[in-house]
Image (cartoon, rainbow, N blue to C red):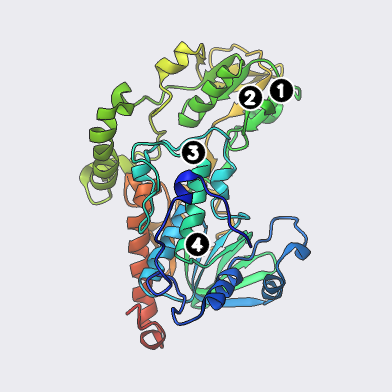
Amino acid sequence: MGEIPHPTHLRKMQGFPDAGTRPGSVDPTLDSNRRMWMRNDHSVVVEEGQALEALEPRARRRSRVETEELDVLVIGGGQAGLSVGYHLAQCGVERFLILDANARVGDAWRQRWDSLRLFSPARFNGLDGMPFPAPPRSMPTKDEFADYLEAYARHFELPVWNGVRVDGVSRSGERYLVTSGTKRFLAREVVVAMADYQKPKTPAFAGELDPSIVQLHSSAYKRPAQLRPGTVLLVGAGNSGAEIAMELRQAGHPVVVAGPSVGSVPGWFQSAFGQVVFAPLLFRGIFHRLLTESTPVGRKVKAKGHRPTPLIRTLPKHLAAAGVERVGRVCGVRDGRPMLEDGRALDVQNVIWSTGFHAGFSWLRVPVFDERGNPRQKRGVSESPGLYFVGLTFLYAMSSSMIHGIGRDAQYVAERIVERLASAPGGSETRSAAA
């Protein structure tokens, strides 16, 4: 399959443990050719609309199997899914798969805008078992993090099937039936390992804008060349909107940012003092330890619901210095132009909707959602036996949807899965390592 290129820090990674010490499901007594065959057999890549002839012969034969029966199926191959896979393997669970809709592990990050850098330092961007290979205070690019995830999956030989987009999950007796087109999976345990912002959200009146105005959701924005010459209206004043606004201003576009202020971290947060002293306090202390369901203040914060993260890197003073104009909310359309709360209609040639996402769980046909559409769960364990969530906003703590906080939730869910598997008929025999 060839070696996948990695950024400088990832290419320098050395000392991968041998198969006998990896926490994957590979038998260390097998020779290297057999180990590679197993890994390829769990890496089916089927892009949407791609001809089956593009599949490897062995993968093509495997794709015709009507139903795969498993102990555990993990839906999502990003940082949440890989973390769950790592902890399942650490616990000795063997019969599990990770399904990823993307062609390659990490593609969800590669598909974001070209200049994106993570908002947290590299020291907080590693998953359990493998630190991020970069200077601790550096801010990795989105492609570096994507390649890190791919290296992580390879390093621990996690059984990821790429190009498999799940379109249905439902109960089938004591198990769950998971479908992806013609593919079917039956699993006793299912983990939905993804964030609750999967489907881009735009206001209903967006369709009333003049057709000459270029419209993009921020998730579809890649670079300034996608836009027409002229003014860009960015609707949404969070971190993504601020970063894109600055890039477009530097590219020569007049830029207007609409929406209320979300606040910002102190300017000294990016200084050496801020990164050495305050960043660990914020990420490890406040987000990970203080603001959890186990503390009164954490429960109070969670009850208020999701709120935008304060600006971290591109601050209001930076936007003002660059000449970005700030206005109030966009509330509708007048004569084909976006209209503000004060009645003004803006003459713009482009609109980027940085207006958030829907959860996108319509394919999950199990009655575990409350009246607001949120999964009813406790630390990732849902009301439906054998169904779990990892990666949701404030699943257990403020850090639950952050890279550095996912591992704790993944470990907790993996341990609950092991308990259920051990209690199943034959569990103590077939999964002795897990017991």
* Mark positioned earlier in the residue sequence (3 or 2): 3
Query: In the picture shown, does residue 347 fall above or below 13?
Result: above
Residue located beneath label 1 in the image: 213
Percent x, y of residue 170: 56, 67
In front: label 3 or label 2: 3
Asked if marks 2 and 1 touch (Cβ < 8 Å), the reply is: yes
Position in image of residue 358 (x %, y %): 54, 44
Where disc 3 sits, the SS reads loop
> Which residue carries the number 2 mark?
351
**Position of residue 427 in the picture relative to residue 224 (left or right):** left
Q: Is residue 240 above or below residue 105?
A: above
* Quarter location, residue 409: bottom left
Per the model, the C-alpha gap separating discs 1 and 3 is 30 Å
| Among numbered discs 2 and 1, the one appearing first in the sequence | 1
- From the image, state whether disc 4 or disc 1 is nearer to you: 4
Q: Which mark is residue 154?
A: 4
Query: How far apart in space, not on screen, are marks 3 and 2 (Cα)?
Result: 25 Å
Q: Amino acid at mark 1?
A: Ile
Disc nearest the viewer among 2 and 4: 4
Q: Which numbered disc, 1 or 3, marks the residue that appears first in the sequence?
A: 3
430 lies above or below 351: below
Contact flag, marks 4 and 1 (Cβ < 8 Å)? no
Q: How many angstroms separate mark 2 from mark 4 (CA)?
A: 40 Å
Crowding near pointer 3: few (<14 within 10 Å), some, many (20+)? some
Quadrant of the image for the C terminus?
Answer: bottom left
How far apart are the alpha carbons under marks 2 and 1? Answer: 7 Å
Crowd class of label 2 (few under 14; some 14 to 19; many from 20; radius 10 Å): many
Q: Which residue is mark 3?
A: 141
Comes first in the chain, label 4 or label 1: 4
Kindly check if marks 1 and 3 are in contact, taking CB atoms under 8 A apart as contact: no
Q: Secondary structure at mark 4?
A: helix
